[in-house]
Each structure stands twice: as C-alpha cells, then as structure tokens.
Amino acid sequence: MAVEERTGTRTAALEAERERWVARGVATQPVFVDRAHGARIVDVDGREYVDFVGGIGTLNGGHTPEAVVRAIHEQADRYLHQCYSVVQYEPYLEVCRRLCRIHPGDGPFKAMLVNSGAEAVENAVKIARHATGRQAVICFEQGFHGRTTLALTLTAKAMPYKRGFGPFAPEVYRAPGPWPYRGIGTREAIDGVRRLLRSQVDPSAVAAVIYEPVQGEGGFLPAPPGFIEELYGLCQEHGILYIDDEVQAGMCRTGPPAALDHVGISPDLAVWGKSLGGGLPLAAVTGRAEVMDAVHPGGLGGTFAGNPLSCVAAIVALDEVLDPAFQARATALGIRLRARLDDLATRVEAIGEVRGLGPMLALELVTDRVSKEPAAALTADVVRRAREAGLLLMAAGLYSNVLRVLVPLVARDEDVDEGLEILERCLVEATAAAA
Ligand SMILES: Cc1ncc(COP(=O)(O)O)c(C=O)c1O
C-alpha cells in the first residue's frame, strides 16, 4: 500500500503538516525519519528502509557512526560556536591539516572551511579570480555546482534548478560535457573547449575551469580517458586555474579520497563537501598555498564557516578517508556493486548503460536500447515502487532517467543484497507496467 494512501499513520499526519508549513519548492519524499544507523533508516511508523541515497552522498561513513556521534557529544559539552574570524579553535586547524593531505598532489597546500558545497564553489571562484586577476569561468554541460547564484549559473539543468531564477552571474561560459553514451567523447569535449576559447572568451580572460571528475547530478558521468589530462593541459597552456569539484565524488565515493586520484593530476583548487562533515554541514576549499594565499586577510570567511561541531565530526570522517583499509573497503564495494549491476543489465532491457567509477555507480534507463530515448517516467516509477518496498533511491541526470547508487560505503553485505533485490524487482515490475 502506498505511503501516501496509509491514512491514519503518523507519516500521513506529518505529510499534511508539511503541506501546510513547508515551501512547495523544497521537494522531498513522503518519508519521515525516526532514527537511522549504518545504511538503514526507520521511519516514524516503524517501517525500515535500506538507504541507497545516503543524504545524496553525504553519509559515506553511514548514519550515526559511533565515533562521529561521540566526538559531537564531547564537543557540545565544551563549546558550540565561536566564529573562526573572531577567535580560533584547534578542530578547525585539524580539519585543514587533514584536508591538505587529501588534496591530490604534492603540496604545499592550504585550506579554508565553509558551510555548503555551493559556498565552497563560490569561494574557489573568488580565490581563482583574485589569484589570476581574471574574471571568466568555464564550466560544463551536465555540471552541478550548487544553488546560490554563481553556483547556479555554473549548474547546467534548467528544470528544476534554473527556471525562473535569473538573471544569472556574468562571465560564465559552458562547454559540452563529455558523455560517451550520447556521443560526446574526449575528442568532442576537448574540441568544444577549444572552440569556446576561440568563439566566446579569450583564454587570457579566463580565471578558472571547474569540473566534476564524475558528474554527479548530471547522471554519474565519469570523465572519459584522457579528458581531464587534456583539459588540465589546456589550463596550463593558458594560465587558467583548474578547480576540481569533489563535493559529491570525493571522500572515497569512488574508492580513493579524491576522484581525481584516479587521474593523477594535481588541481590548483579543489572543493569538498557532503560526506566531509560526517553528517554535519561542512565544506571546504583546498589549493596550492600561493593561490589560496593570494587573497588579502579578511577577504574570506563566514559566520558559521567551520563550526566546531562540524569540525570534530569531519576529523573523524577524514581520518577514516585517510585510512587505506577504508579506501580498500570502498573499492571492494564498487567491484561488487558493478558486477551485480552489470548482471542486472543482462536481464533488464530498460538499462541502457551501467556506469560510474568505483562505488559511485548508476543505471541510465531508456525506453529502448537503440534509440536510447530517456525513460524518465519509468525511472520515477522505480523510485516510487522501491520506496514502497523499503529501498530509498534517487534519480539524477539531465533527463531525470538515471538511478544512482550512493549507498553508505560502510553498508553491510545484507544491506546491499536486500537493496539490489528490491531494485531488480521494482525495475521488472515497473517495466512490465510501462509495456
Ligand atoms: C558536485 C557538486 N558540487 C556542489 C554541490 C553543492 O553542494 P551543496 O548542496 O552542499 O551546496 C553539489 C550538491 O549536490 C554537488 O553534487
């Protein structure tokens, strides 16, 4: 029975309250959490869900990890907030120290903390502009970099993110993003950047390029071989800074601490968020020390940026990410998930492509494999059926036809198995219903 139909339940009562009090633009699912641990959520009516969304990649370490919860409790007894622009505290320093270790390449690096991924993106652009004395920024189709005005300008999906929210920020130029399944490989994408640098903006005016090594919201599109290397080469040729957006793909989501570790280049700047805070809001910019230090004292900051509670949680999360055993566990999960999803694709015709990097994996659903027509309605139906059956899923992609798997990296085998069984059942049922 649909949650929406379960009249008389606590969920139904709270849904009515939500309709009354919460702005319609804040879209969500009809599930109210009572408690959560590991890869499981229990709702206010006692229903249990396997969580394949993990707060959209915010919970790589799982729900309520004991060490994070303990650190928060201990910190809460000492002090809650200071504002790092007023007085300092060690946890902020300790987070920056660890972040500089996960920034790909050899330092010296420096870091700064903020509240959200969008704020990290905005600050990275500010720093790049200040360091280069240039204004333009190049971003890519299928990119998602946040919802504040500059970050939203960089984001490449009109509905639901951009419609009605203009005017957008100036000096943002968008190149075609690589998407081999739909005909844009490394060559086409690099040619697109070269064309842009001839037709739309002179390279000498470009401060930075920003790119997600696996485009997340865009549909889990990993950079095809050679793309990042060539893009980085173009940046070096023209004195353009390379901003690596690790907000969704970082923190071991693809196996190693940074998704860019798969490529082996050292970005000038990187932005981090989501799982960095171990479940609390925290984001960061890291970068080459001389680039980060280009900005004058007082030019960067924010009232709650690097809140102490978030910092102590992040120390635990970062120690985990720096642990080779955790990285190996993430990689092993990726191998296991990939084999299972590839196998699923042999049985479910609607799966056009299984793709991703490490345990950051997704299924692109199509109405048929030849025309590759995106199957958005089918995708939405699978998400709904899965929820009813006890699995939380979330769609992604330009055409909203991609099912992404962001299960916490600490998920137990039985969580993954149960989730995949529900996923297969719902895919089969939804496909039959659509026929
Ligand atoms: C790659 C990427 N960058 C930036 C952001 C923005 O992060 P936030 O929602 O914390 O502002 C997101 C959020 O999904 C993201 O996936």
Image (cartoon, rainbow, N blue to C red):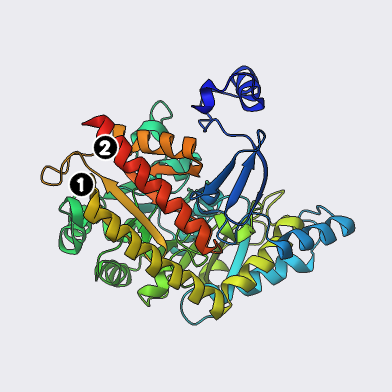
For disc 2, the marked residue is: 431
Secondary structure state at the residue bearing disc 2:
helix
**Whole-percent x and y of residue 98?**
63, 73
Quarter of the picture holding the C terminus: top left
Residue 88 in view here: yes
**Which amino acid, by three-letter code, is at mark 2?**
Thr
* Residue displayed at 41% across by 51% down: 421
The image position of residue 344, as x and y in percent, is 29, 55
Residue 91 numbered tag: none
The residue labelled by disc 1 is 349
| Earlier sequence position, callout 2 versus callout 1 | 1
352 versus 94 height, above or below? above
Query: How dense is the environment of label 2, judged by Cα within 10 Å: few (below 14), some, or many (20 and up)?
Result: some
The residue that appears at 80% across and 52% down in the rendered structure is 81
Query: Is 46 on the left-hand or right-hand side of 209?
Result: right
Q: How far apart are marks 2 and 1 (CA)?
A: 9 Å
Instruction: Give the residue at x 41% y 60%.
Output: 360
Q: In this view, does 115 lie above or below 15?
A: below
Task: Say if mark 2 contacts mark 1, CB within 8 Å.
Answer: yes
Within-10-Å neighbours for mark 1: few <14, some 14–19, many 20+: some
Please tell me which residue is depicted at 64% across the width and 59% down the height of the picture: 278
